[in-house]
Image (tube, rainbow, N blue to C red):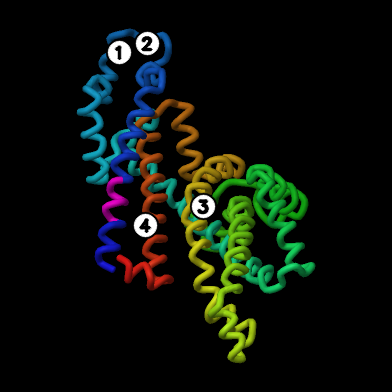
Amino acid sequence: MLRYLLSRLISLVLSLAVASLVIFAMLEIVPGDPAAVMLGMNAQPEALAALRAELGLDLPLAQRYVAWVGGMLQGDFGISYTYRVPVADLIAARLGVSLPLTLYAIFLSTALAIPLGVWAATRHGRPADLAIMGVTQLGIAVPNFWFAMILVLIFAIRLGWFASGGFPGWDAGLFAGLKSLTLPALALALLQASILARVMRSSLLETLDRDYIRTARAKGLSRGRAVLRHALRNALIPVMTILGMQVSVLIAGAIVVENVFFLPGLGRLIFQAVTQRDLIVVEAVVMLLVFAVVLVNFLVDLAYAVVDPRLRRSA
């Protein structure tokens, strides 16, 4: 198990190192000058040179990359070109919205997908199975931003149960905060729940055809107990794989959904930073999101070893 853990840690570190190089290189080749964006098109060359020196834009690329990575390792993401405040403060303020939104969406998608997938698999070929597969196919086809607008029209404008956008802050109370994140979380969770439910159904159907399930049934174990005690645990491995991959999809979807609901999260921050060409904010936020995706995949690998003892023995 220790060897398996060390191999996963090495993979995590290498992934982050490569990602940092790619992010830095990609943003450096983007055309345009941040100093010119900040000062305007009619800025004097002397003012541009002074601002570039203040922001460190006149340093060699290698020196800037080393300084950027070293600062991140110490928790210093630099100073925003636009807001003139530490990027770490901007991220901390926006993370209080994006992190609960992502966790909320993951909870909703998992809570919906696992029971639906199990229900469809145990009723394979019946009307319930066909209905669930039809609904999940529709959920995969519907874009999350369109579904978000439909939710606003129904539950915010017509029924008035939720606000159409904005975030009151956690100071207003846990219930008020979660209520404002419910519609965005549902918009993000629809696609993920549809995919997870279909994967759960397929994996469980394959597991139910195994010899050890037939043996358990032959010994008198009921179908429900055979599913819960033997089949479900093995069927969860592909589901965990998809769940880990969906974190990046949720992050990408949150950029759009946060703008639909006017949520002050990381998605809206990175959208504003790109339009204002605030490269230091874009680099920091994208690197943080990459770290989140890599970390989640690392945790999923550890979950494999917990669910499947064969991985521990092979490692």
Q: Which circle's residue, 3 or 1, is located before the other in the chain?
A: 1
Q: Which residue is mark 3?
A: 246
Q: Between 185 and 215, which is closer to the camera in this rendering?
A: 215
Mark 1 vs mark 4: give the one in front: 4
Q: Secondary structure at mark 3?
A: helix
Could you tell me how far apart the alpha carbons at marks 1 and 4 are, in whole angstroms?
46 Å
Could you tell me how far apart the alpha carbons at marks 3 and 4 are, in whole angstroms?
14 Å
Could you tell me how far apart the alpha carbons at marks 3 and 2 are, in whole angstroms?
45 Å
Q: Which residue is mark 4?
A: 298
Q: Which circle's residue, 1 or 4, is located before the other in the chain?
A: 1
Q: Which mark is residue 43?
A: 2
Write the residue at 55% across / 44% down.
Answer: 253
Q: Position of residue 49 (x, y in %)?
A: 27, 14
Task: Confirm whether residue 113 shows in the render.
Answer: no
Magenta stretch, residue numbers: 9-14
Task: Confirm whether residue 117 shows in the render.
Answer: yes
Mark 3 vs mark 2: give the one in front: 3
Q: Which circle's residue, 3 or 2, is located before the other in the chain?
A: 2
Q: Secondary structure at mark 1?
A: helix
The residue most toward the right is 127
Could you tell me how far apart the alpha carbons at marks 2 and 1 are, in whole angstroms?
7 Å
Q: Secondary structure at mark 4?
A: helix
Compared to residue 215, the image places residue 11 above or below, namely: above
Mark 4 vs mark 2: give the one in front: 4
Residue type, mark 2 in image: Ala
Write the residue at 40% across / 66% down.
Answer: 303
Q: Which circle's residue, 4 or 2, is located before the other in the chain?
A: 2
Magenta stretch: includes residue 11: yes
